[in-house]
């Protein structure tokens, strides 16, 4: 077993599949945008304090109120990918959640124009592969979900690869979104959903069995249902786990060590490691790799495998995934040489 230093883990090439562009935004940027739009939000860094998912989401609302123009969305998208690239992320699938600003009168087209521009600039400048997933807002209901599926369906599939769902989980009738997911599938969008974060495993079951979801965001509660766990192992439906977020945002566990992450991996599930809202948590994906290696005493081999699991679970085309695997393996070897460790 090889033990990696913190520096080594920070520089490991990574894939991230669960990160919200609004929640990744820098407090300094939100402050600047709020001032430009004549809004008084105080110091956003003070706002980035929360004790459960619903409180977090009310703060998310305040953050999103500073996002008004396409250029605002271009900037936060570019900066989020810049921050990710600095953590070793080579490929990212990021969520954007137009529901939070649509209710303030910002058209979804404006949001997408900005996000798309930021994405294209980041691809060109930063050597990072990136695609977006449009998350509809669950509390806004099935008509909003359908509208988002139709909008996402009409965009360039190489840039907008999928549809997901986020925000409140408890008390939401997830079955009500079945038609929206059918519409998404009809457009060739890949489908995912936040489920089993602070709600029950039943929501994961509905997502994979009735909504046609190909990936589950969080899936924290999955092991509560052994039959469903066996089904996800069998179908290799990935979980995009966010252990520190589950401590800091959903507050469903006291520490990362209490997360079922290691148990889920031992069960044969395809589990990936993600940050969720790195700006608002002030905890990056590089911090997350260090925290998880520490909490579960993972070897470098296990951390490299975790990084590769992100490629397996990605919605990228097969040829791109094959190229990522090859370049990750080369980088793993180079890093091992640099840190004076035995080769794999
Ligand atoms: N939107 C941003 N972060 C979220 C989370 N952790 N759960 C649900 N919706 C979110
Ligand atoms: Zn999330």
Image (cartoon, rainbow, N blue to C red):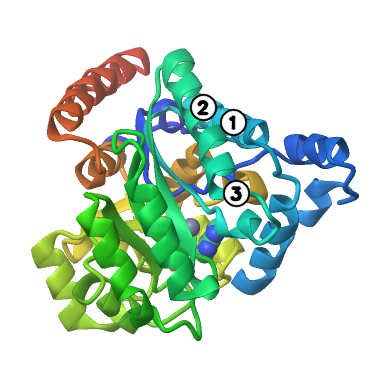
Q: Are marks 1 and 2 in contact (CB under 8 Å)?
A: yes
Q: Residue at 72%, 52% (x, y): give it.
A: 63
Q: Which mark is residue 107?
A: 3
Element type at mark 3: loop
For the N terminus, the quadrant is top left
Few, some or many C-alpha atoms within 10 Å of disc 3 (few <14, some 14-19, many ≥20)?
some
CB of mark 1 near ligand 1 (< 8 Å) = no
Element type at mark 2: helix
Picture quarter containing residue 309? Answer: top left
For the C terminus, the quadrant is top left
Would you say 341 lies left or right of 5 here?
left
Compared with 310, 41 (above or below) is below
Q: Residue at 63%, 44% (x, y): give it.
A: 279
Q: What is the x, y in percent for residue 275?
A: 49, 48
Q: Nearer the viewer, residue 312 or 34?
A: 34
The residue wearing badge 1 is 74
Q: What is the x, y in percent for residue 329?
A: 21, 24
Compared with 63, 160 (above or below) is above
The residue wearing badge 2 is 117
Q: Nearer the viewer, residue 207 or 83?
A: 207
Compared with 254, 280 (above or below) is above
Q: Considering only order in the chain, which callout, 2 or 1, is on the residue closer to the N terminus? A: 1
Q: Considering only order in the chain, which callout, 2 or 3, is on the residue closer to the N terminus? A: 3
Element type at mark 1: helix
Q: What is the x, y in percent for residue 45?
A: 79, 47
Whole-number angstrom distance, CA of label 1 to CA of label 2: 6 Å
């Amino acid at each position: 077993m090889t033990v990696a230093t913190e520096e080594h883990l920070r520089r490991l090439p990574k894939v991230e599949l669960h990160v919200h562009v609004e929640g990744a935004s820098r407090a300094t940027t939100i402050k600047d945008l709020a001032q430009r739009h004549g809004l008084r939000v105080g110091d956003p860094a003070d706002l980035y304090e929360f004790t459960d998912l619903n409180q977090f989401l009310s703060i998310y609302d305040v953050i999103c109120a500073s996002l008004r123009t396409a250029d605002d969305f271009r900037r936060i998208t570019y900066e989020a990918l810049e921050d990710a690239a600095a953590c070793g992320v080579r490929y990212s699938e990021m969520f954007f959640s137009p529901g939070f600003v649509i209710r303030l009168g910002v058209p979804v087209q404006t949001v997408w124009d900005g996000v798309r521009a930021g994405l294209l600039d980041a691809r060109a400048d930063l050597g990072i592969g990136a695609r977006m997933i449009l998350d509809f807002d669950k509390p806004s209901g099935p008509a909003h979900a359908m509208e988002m599926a139709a909008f996402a369906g009409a965009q360039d599939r190489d840039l907008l690869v999928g549809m997901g769902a986020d925000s409140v989980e408890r008390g939401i009738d997830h079955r009500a979104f079945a038609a929206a997911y059918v519409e998404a599938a009809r457009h060739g969008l890949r489908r995912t959903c936040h489920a089993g974060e602070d709600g029950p495993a039943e929501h994961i079951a509905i997502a994979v069995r009735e909504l046609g979801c190909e990936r589950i965001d969080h899936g924290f509660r999955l092991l509560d249902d052994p039959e469903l766990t066996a089904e996800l192992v069998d179908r290799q439906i990935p979980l995009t786990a966010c252990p520190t977020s589950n401590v800091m945002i959903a507050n469903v566990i006291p520490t990362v060590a209490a997360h079922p992450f290691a148990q889920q991996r031992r069960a044969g599930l395809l589990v990936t490691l993600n940050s969720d809202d790195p700006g608002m948590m002030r905890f990056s994906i590089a911090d997350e790799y260090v925290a998880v290696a520490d909490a579960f005493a993972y070897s470098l081999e296990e951390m490299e495998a975790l990084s590769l699991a992100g490629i397996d679970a990605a919605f990228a085309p097969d040829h791109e995934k094959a190229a990522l695997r090859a370049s990750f393996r080369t980088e793993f070897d180079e890093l091992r040489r640099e840190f004076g460790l035995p080769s794999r």
